[in-house]
Image (spheres, rainbow, N blue to C red):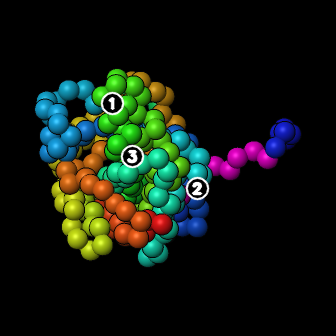
Amino acid sequence: MPSYVFPAHDIVGLPVAGTAELFPVRRVYCVGRNYAAHAREMGFDPEREPPFFFCKPNDSAAVLPVAEGVVTELPYPPATANLHYECELVVAIGKGGSNISVQDAAAHIFGYGVGLDMTRRDLQFTMRDAGRPWEIGKAFDYSAPVGVLTRAAEAGDIGHASITLEVDGTLKQNSTIAHLIWNVSETIANLSTLFTLQPGDLIFSGTPEGVGPVVRGQTLVGRIDGLAELSARMV
Ligand code: MN
């Protein structure tokens, strides 16, 4: 065993429905503007341009496992006055590869979960408008809560599942995974031309329309048919 100058960082393990074993998180990829109505609300014309990607940190400060049936406390981040929720289908990769074909992509999926791509919208827009990277808007601590994963074979027809987000019981996002511009298999195929995917990678597949602000004390509930619900209260 190597010896480190201070204790090595733990990797994040996400609970998996039906087992005590955890899914070890490796990388966190995210797809931008992958629902047409969300692209429009962000001020873009949702032509079917190639998907684009950004990343979030994979450490235990950024990726927050959210157990089922528990309201997890989600710390409000610093340096923002406009924190937004983005409810997303998270794809958990179980088999790695590069240049994966659309036809083969499903075989690389371990399972799915509900995730929140938390976004400091004010900082994202400041950076975006200056032509600078999005990191400070997207890659902060606790920016990636993820619910319990469900194995793909047990998740039903995820490609047509409904996806919703409520804030304090009020419906804010309400769409279907079928509205993805680039579906899950196409996203995996494209991403794998850019990076070699490995078991443990997560892909946040994009958010539907209805994104908006959340403040301390409010509770977010994300749901996707067939998957464990995610509940988090901003503190
Ligand atoms: Mn997003």
Q: Amino acid at mark 3?
A: Arg
* Range covered by the magenta-colored residues: 7-14
Badge 3: residue crowd in 10 Å (few <14, some 14–19, many ≥20): many
Looking at the image, is 24 positioned above or below residue 170? Answer: above
User: Few, some or many C-alpha atoms within 10 Å of disc 2 (few <14, some 14-19, many ≥20)?
Assistant: some
Residue 20 numbered mark, or none: none
Indicate the position of residue 111 as horizontal and vertical percent values.
Answer: 41, 53
Q: Is residue 11 magenta?
A: yes
Q: Position of residue 17 (x, y in %)?
A: 47, 66
Q: Which residue is mark 3?
A: 120
According to the picture, the residue beneath numbered tag 2 turns out to be 13
Please report the residue visible at 30 percent of the width from the left and 28 percent of the height from the top. 129
Please state which of residues 76 and 81 is positioned toward the viewer in this rendering.
Answer: 81
| 1 or 3: tag closer to the N-terminus | 3
Location of the N terminus by quadrant is: top right
Question: Which residue appears at 30% of the width and 56% of the height?
Answer: 213
- Label ID, residue 128: 1
Magenta: predominant secondary structure element? loop
Image point 44% across, 62% down: which residue? 147
Name the residue rendered at 59%, 62% in the picture.
Answer: 21
Q: Answer whether labels 1 and 3 touch (C-beta < 8 Å).
A: no
Query: In what element is the residue under mark 2?
Result: strand
Instruction: Name the N-terminal-most of marks 1 and 2.
Output: 2
